[in-house]
Image: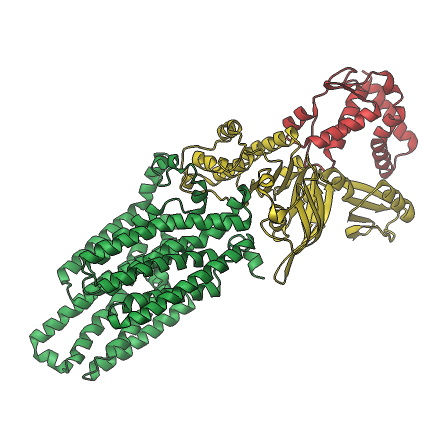
Chain colours: A yellow, B red, C green
Amino acid sequence: MNSATVEASKLSKAFGSKQVLQDISFGVSPGDVIGVLGKNGAGKTTLLDLMLGFTPPTAGAIRVFGHESHSLPGNIKARVGFVPQQDELLDQLSAADQLRVIASFYPRWDSALISRLCGEWGVPLDVRIKSMSVGERQKLSILLAFGHQPELLILDEPVASLDPIARRQFLEQLLTISTDGQRAIVFSSHIVSDIERLANRIWILKEGRLDWQGDLDSLKESIVRLHIRGTGPELPAFQIPGVLNVRRDGAFATAVVRDWTPEAQEALEKGASVQVDVEALGLEEIFVELHR
Amino acid sequence: MFILNPQSGVPIYRQILEQVRRMVASGQLAPGTALPSVRDLAIRHTINPMTISRAYSILETEGLLERNRGKPMTVASQSRNHSQLPKRLEQIGPLVKQTVIAAKQLQLSEAELVKAVRREWEQNDE
Amino acid sequence: MKAVARLVWSYFMGSLVTRVCTFGGLVLIAVAFYVLMTQPQSGEMLWLASIGMIVFFAGSSLMPMMFGRLGGSHSIGVLPGGRLKLLLSAFVTVVIVAIPAALVTPAGYVAGNAGSFADLAKNPQYLEFTLQLAKLMFTSAVLFAGWLYLAMWFISRQRDVAGFSKGLLVMAIVIFTPARDISDLTVSLSWNLLQIAISWLVFGAGFLLWPRYKAVRARRGRDRSAAFALAPARGTAGREFDLMLGTANPWLLIAAFVVPLLIATRFAEGFLQIWLFFLTIFSTVSGAIAGEAAGRSRALWLRGNWTREDLFRQVERSFWRHNGIVLGSLILILFGIGSYAGLPVTMLAVGLPLLILGTVLSTYLGLMITRGLRWLEVLLGIGVMLTLMAVAVIAREREDLVTVFALLASLAVLALALRFTARRRWTRIDWMLCRPDRSLAVRAA
């Protein structure tokens, strides 16, 4: 239990009468890279803020490195890194000064890594942050969370303003970080292709609940689209467990199902005497289908 | 070495499995060939290493790959491959199924299909 | 020209509120004018006219904001003659808003002098004088309105509490100086015309040439003025906390108000209470920065070794350091300039606790803002400001001292209460609720 980086059980969060998160339980282990997907307003930022202790849960508990997130002690905070959705840079400083300021709060700071990345990513060091472009600001924000080599890195839409090349550089760096140490990364993003590359686990937040949490691989094997053909002109009636939506069209039907297994396929084919072809879906398709 | 598509509905580990199996079966990957390390592959393709290492583990249990202490994984020796016949047949299963379905839809007889297959086999031998 | 007319029309009629103000103001002005023209001895109507003019001015209040938005947008550069037309529309608005003053003041003057308008025709000197008065009022109103619009634009651009307070102060200064000139009738027509010409020329030139200036700057490369940043990097070792909190540089704030203060001093003879009152308001601005502390402290909490309780103590300490320096400067100004300008000792004696209380109260009020600005904080803020202002104004006669002392004592008690509340709120601070931009949807709940 103590090896868990983050642990939440039956977490709920409400603001006044508005219930934002309900009954969320999860675990984050070292080495996990977790992609958090969800529509706008589904509660992604709230979940991340709860992890960081910025806000207390209304019900349930959430612990980071064994400590309650709301009252994290200083030595635990030094093991956590955070990239917020809106940057918190000080406009009047230069990037170098901003880095220096943040570095001063931490006992460990890898200046060599940061200088190298500033060079590779194109973050100008002696220009005032006020005159930096949005992409440069975001890159700087990300670097501010790397320097102290955190074991838990939490990122809220970190690449929204980056061009594809910058995003690729960021992904590469994140991969290097996660493969090097036993670090855990939790990040929310709308850019599904990035999540597909980077994450090994996916959390899908829907209306405040964790609609799916598990391996990305299992997710892709579990939510599939079935193309069903009958032998005659009309398709016989059939029942599929875990169906998300179905469309019938004479002798054909397509159905998107969750929790699909080869046994279920056999059962369907034999039981309703139909022919079933399975189409595997990419993450974006899966996300769209889950929200239909 | 591999063509990997993270956006595909097929999980990456499965893509690696299929490609390694095919390449070993076809001889493209000779026994003793070293495979890229998990880390190298992850960084080169910008994908999560865990899915790669899962593929490698499965391939190791299947006997296709060998783990060498301190060195990258290598393709296992041929003798273990021959016992893989059922596996190899299983590999080609979906393609056979597709061909049979297509033939039936085109209202070809079994004999006509077999003739077509034989013709293709002989042509390919050259 | 059609574009200019359309723009001006939308300034006055753009929203329901401004439409109501425009019509209401015009009605009031018309009524007052009619009465002034027809009834002798009706000088009191001037009050009604003044209110009408203020309301009418409010009806045009969309102008500075729209001007700012359009002026800075990309589309204005693409429209033919866009910037020039925008500039013209602003000038036309200023002129329109100044016309009532030009009509009403002479009418009020005539009516107040128990004359009738028939007399005007008979007496050429009288007519001459009235016309001169009209021209004078018109030009003064044009100047005044122009500065007021500028101040309003400045305020509308501010995004946070500190900026907003700065804007209000600018507005106060802007009103104070010309108003004084007008009430003293120390203006002259030629001086007014000269001011109008110069200010609009400078403004117009700057506005029209702005895109060219931006292009040149862009070509020259980016702003490499980090070396001149007023938040010195070298000397801030150990001040990182203050930098992130926004309290690293009290000298910036001091520099920002020394100039207006000196200007106010120059015009302050006979208006000494007003001067003290300004000084008091300035003492509260330094506390307005405290309103941002909650939002900025999130990053500090995450990176530092403090509990929320510890964090409050650190923040408080940082603000005492910052505000202490500001307060010290204000006190120096109070005693230095005050005695030079001949302020009575009573006022100096009252000024000291006033400034201290102003600083302390506004700081803790600002620190209390951990859930955004809500009714309690606004009401407290207004109450405190009014009380401070009242004390500044009545601290003149010896007889008032008892009231003054009572008020100051109750303010001191309030300060303690505010500190207690602020501290309690910080131990439970919820960073999802403290900034509107972070929790828009959430706060709607």
Can the viewer see residue C92 in this picture?
no
Nearest the camera: C395 or B10?
C395
Q: Residue at x 84, y 16 (%)?
A: B78
Instruction: State whether residue B74 is above or below residue C251.
Output: above
> Position of C96 compared to C360: left or right?
left
Q: In which quarter of the image is the C terminus of chain B?
A: top right
The answer to which quarter of the image holds residue C433 is bottom right
x then y, percent, for residue C51: 30, 73
x then y, percent, for residue C8: 33, 62
Nearest the camera: C140 or C261?
C261
The answer to which quarter of the image holds residue C406 is bottom left
x then y, percent, for residue C237: 42, 36
Q: Which residue is drawn at 22% across and 55% down?
A: C337
The answer to which quarter of the image holds residue C285 is bottom left
Q: How many numbered circles are shown?
A: 0
Nearest the camera: A57 or A266?
A57
> Position of C285 compared to C258: left or right?
right
Q: Quadrant of the N terminus of chain B?
A: top right
Instruction: State whether residue B79 is above or below residue B88.
Output: above
x then y, percent, for residue A185: 64, 38
> Position of C172 compared to A160: left or right?
left
Can the viewer see residue B79 in this picture?
yes
